[in-house]
Image: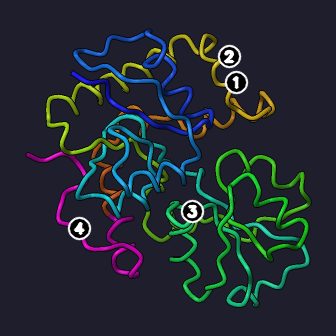
């Protein structure tokens, strides 16, 4: 059997989740992986459009475009409450002018971009840039506002910025569900048995990290772009939770609602496949 190609982001939640699996700490039950690709989530989103990887981290927005080819695993997702993207700006920004504003988004296929489009459909001047460049761009005035993700929610005030809208809070108040941010997806062509083995291995990897968190820290820090250690731990604590271990019925329902609302808003195409694997 050829090794499976695997991609995930260098963010602390993903390196925490995949450390044990990629460092021989958990059994793979018949599967084996090649060296993982650690890339920004928008890069992984664009690769999924091309079907490049067998197993990959994806934004749930991107998932809505590739459901014919990929399905969601029950383990590895980033989904929860109080963890959504933030719309930030300088303190002197006039909220009434949001429709005319230049707003930075962290990639067109990110969940953050889709959430903002649903929250403010009248805003059309969207500027794509890497997530870690957005706060500086807002601070300099290159854009009027920005949608920030990942650890930026812990540091935006250091740039003198204010939160105009917590988009995760808006989602929770609108739907009464946790916000689906990202998932681990597998190619449907791998088949039921292989997909189940990968899902189980990822869950085992998370459980191992929960049991031996100290052993993961070197790997996490290596890829965390000189992130402050407390921010790194807060990041993991926020984005690795019970939904990461198992989406469960509540998590799956939240994903279904998110994708349905995206289709109703004209952002996502119609789908012929369920989000989970079906024969």
Identify which residue, 146 or 70, lies in the foreground: 70
Q: Secondary structure at mark 2?
A: helix
Marks 4, 3: nearer the viewer: 4
Marks 3, 1: nearer the viewer: 1
* Image coords of residue 135 (percent x, y): 80, 59
Residue at 57% x, 41% y is 39
Tell me how far mark 1 sits from mark 2, CA to CA. Answer: 6 Å
Tell me how far mark 1 sits from mark 4, CA to CA. Answer: 39 Å
Instruction: Of the two numbered discs 3 and 1 on the same chain, state the one appearing first in sequence.
Output: 3
* Image coords of residue 63 (percent x, y): 37, 57
Tell me how far mark 2 sits from mark 4, CA to CA. Answer: 41 Å
Q: Which mark is residue 271?
A: 4
Tell me how far mark 3 sits from mark 1, CA to CA. Answer: 26 Å
Query: Tag 3: Cα neighbours inside 10 Å, few (<14), some, or many (≥20)?
Result: many
- The image quadrant where one finds the N terminus is top left
Instruction: Of the two numbered discs 2 and 4 on the same chain, state the one appearing first in sequence.
Output: 2
Residue extending farthest to the left is 279
Q: Secondary structure at mark 1?
A: helix
* Image coords of residue 188 (percent x, y): 20, 45
Q: Which mark is residue 112?
A: 3
Q: Which mark is residue 263?
A: none
Q: Which mark is residue 222?
A: 1
Query: Tag 4: Cα neighbours inside 10 Å, few (<14), some, or many (≥20)?
Result: some
Tell me how far mark 2 sits from mark 3, CA to CA. Answer: 29 Å
Most common secondary structure along the magenta stretch: loop
Identify which residue, 43 or 202, lies in the foreground: 43
Query: Tag 1: Cα neighbours inside 10 Å, few (<14), some, or many (≥20)?
Result: few
- For disc 2, the marked residue is 218
Mark 1 and 2 residues: CB-CB less than 8 Å, in contact? Answer: yes
* Image coords of residue 27 (percent x, y): 32, 11
């Amino acid at each position: 059997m050829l090794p499976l190609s695997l991609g995930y982001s260098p963010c602390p939640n993903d390196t925490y989740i995949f450390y044990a699996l990629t460092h021989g700490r958990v059994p793979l039950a018949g599967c084996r992986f090649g060296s993982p690709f650690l890339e920004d989530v928008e890069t992984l989103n664009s690769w999924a459009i091309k079907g490049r990887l067998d197993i990959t981290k994806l934004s749930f927005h991107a998932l809505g475009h590739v459901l014919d080819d990929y399905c969601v695993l029950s383990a590895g997702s980033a989904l929860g409450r109080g963890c959504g993207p933030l719309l930030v700006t300088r303190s002197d920004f006039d909220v009434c002018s949001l429709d005319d504003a230049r707003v930075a988004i962290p990639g067109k296929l990110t969940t953050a971009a889709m959430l903002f489009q649903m929250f403010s459909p009248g805003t059309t001047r969207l500027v794509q840039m890497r997530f870690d460049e957005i706060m500086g761009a807002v601070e300099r005035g290159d854009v009027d506002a920005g949608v920030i993700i990942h650890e930026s929610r812990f540091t935006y005030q250091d740039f003198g910025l204010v939160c105009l809208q917590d988009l995760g809070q808006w989602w929770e108040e609108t739907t009464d569900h946790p916000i689906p941010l990202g998932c681990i997806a597998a190619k449907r062509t791998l088949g039921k048995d292989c997909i189940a083995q990968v899902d189980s291995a990822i869950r085992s990897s998370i459980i191992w990290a929960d049991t031996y968190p100290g052993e993961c820290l070197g790997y996490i820090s290596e890829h965390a772009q000189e992130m402050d250690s407390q921010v790194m731990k807060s990041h993991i604590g926020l984005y690795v939770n019970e939904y990461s271990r198992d989406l469960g019925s509540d998590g799956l329902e939240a994903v279904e609602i998110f994708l349905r609302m995206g289709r109703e808003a004209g952002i996502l195409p119609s789908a012929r496949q369920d989000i989970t694997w079906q024969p």
